[in-house]
Image: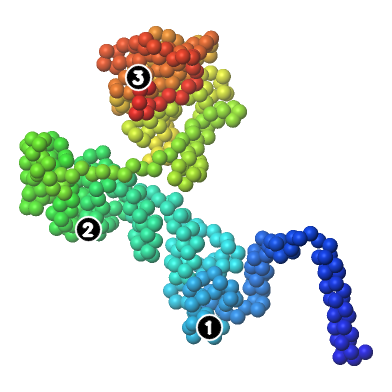
Amino acid sequence: MNNSSFYQALSSELASESTMLEFKLQKIDLGRSQHSLTERPPYRNQHHTQKAFETMNILRKQNLLCDVTLVAGATEVSAHKTVLASCSPYFYAMFTGFTESRANKITLQGLDGTALALLIDYVYSAEIQVTEENVQSLLPAANLLQLSDVQEACCEFLQAQLHPSNCLGIRAFADLHGCLDLLSHCDSYIEQHFVEVTENEEFLALPANQVAHLISSDRLSVPSEEQVFEAVMNWVNQDLANRESQLGSLMEHVRLPLLSQEYLVQRVEEEPLLKGNLPCKDFLIEAMKYHLLRADQKALYATPRTKPRTPVGRPKMLLVVGGQAPKAIRSVECLDLQRERWLQLAELPSRRCRAGLALLDGRLLYAVGGYDGASRQCLSSVERYDPKEEEWSLVADMSARRSGAGVGVLEGVLYAVGGHDGPLVRKSVECYHPDTNSWSHVPDMALARRNAGVVAMDGLLYVVGGDDGSSNLSSVEVYNPKTKTWNILSTFMTIGRSYAGVTIIDRPL
């Protein structure tokens, strides 16, 4: 049989089968209910696109059916124009409206070869690894090729790397490449960490206009205006010969009227660089006059330098320290509430559960007492976490072992209340003074209690509930540090509570 006869026979056979198939379907349709086949949703293969791209990537790597070669420096990458155009507006415009649409080899100027290879891999695989080593070449390349997902991934990576030592450099990088969200986040980070930022080399290397822009912000988070003044002086002294002339324009943005009179007289007025600088002397006189005004006059004398700064609070983090799993552990984790993800922090130096936690000075975290599960003894040791240094350190021990102690902070002093040492439930109390790294005794409570809730309000320390080793307590004791006395509230809770959570809201306790 020749080829013509073969194809004729095959076509006839297929036509016959098609007719039979059609007839059978029609017979089936006649026996169905009133519902039409067209009402059924179309079949959709959820993995079709992924499998297709995986196959095209295999073809690319084998240089099969490729119709373009991209060149960046010494790097050449083969690809398919259709695939590139489908994923990148840059390539879509290139291959549909420019002379490159007919070219099979295209040189991309100003593009890093390694970054190009990574991005073409991403186009086919939807995966890319952003690292410290490649992010500075990857981000501009992704911008050029208009791969917005990769650009966003790079910005998120840099945002997660922000630190007082690098935030100014990352900000400049974000500004250069038009990453507005990252730029805004950098600005907020710098304002919130101003003191730490000014202690690093990047700040001392800033040009004068950027220093002026930074210190003019209303949102700087500083304990006092002293830190702003000292930052300016440190910047000027870093290169005195070339920067002394900038002192007047910078001091315009330092809010000298907000400094204490004592600091103005003893530090600012005595600064040698200011004595011979007429604009600076005028700002100093303005500050001195402001302090002489009555409170009702100060509003009439308002200038940009008399306006208090209004810092934006730092993002809040939820910390979990130690605990049992099932034995006492050293692990410390924090929850980033904005991104809803858990992060590992530096571990405790020793295993610790049932410890009291307190925050001093708004930033130093203390883990007080507890139980280590190994020595089978309660702990008198106290460990302190410094988030700036990202490390734990030991401070002075308490005078007694305390597990399940209540911990609270009142007027910059940390109180450890009650707790137990084995079967002994304590009513003793002691307080920690961070300036001297020492503990001192406080008068005993009326009742021994452990696992109580502790909270400070209006200069008083409230100790709520707990248990005495045999029963839960419904009483509340209140400590007044001025009179150094404890009093039991006349009204009790309706039920005895141990391990209760206690806090303050804008209503009665």
Relative image position of residue 209 (x, y in whole percent)? 22, 59
Relative image position of residue 490 (x, y in whole percent)? 37, 10
Neighbours of disc 3 within 10 Å: few (<14), some (14-19), many (20+): many
Label 2 SS:
helix
Q: Is residue 316 above or below residue 394?
A: below
Q: Which mark is residue 461?
A: 3
Amino acid type, label 3: Leu
User: Which residue matches tag 1?
Assistant: 101
Residue with the most extreme right position: 1
Mark positioned earlier in the residue sequence (1 or 3): 1
Dots 1 and 3: beta carbons under 8 Å? Answer: no
Amino acid type, label 1: Ser
Relative image position of residue 388 (x, y in whole percent)? 38, 41
Residue 431 appears in view: no
Q: Which corner quadrant holds the C terminus?
A: top left
The residue at 47%/64% (across/down) is: 148
The residue at 42%/9% (across/down) is: 447
Dots 2 and 1: beta carbons under 8 Å? Answer: no
Mark positioned earlier in the residue sequence (2 or 1): 1
In the image shown, does 133 or 14 lie closer to the viewer?
A: 14
Asked whether, in this view, residue 190 is left or right of residue 368, the answer is left
User: Which residue matches tag 2?
Assistant: 208
Q: Measure how far apart labels 2 and 1 are at the Cα level.
A: 48 Å
Amino acid type, label 2: Ala
In the image shown, does 450 or 92 lie closer to the viewer?
A: 92
Q: Measure how far apart labels 3 and 2 are at the Cα level.
A: 49 Å
Q: Is residue 320 above or below residue 153?
A: above
Neighbours of disc 2 within 10 Å: few (<14), some (14-19), many (20+): some
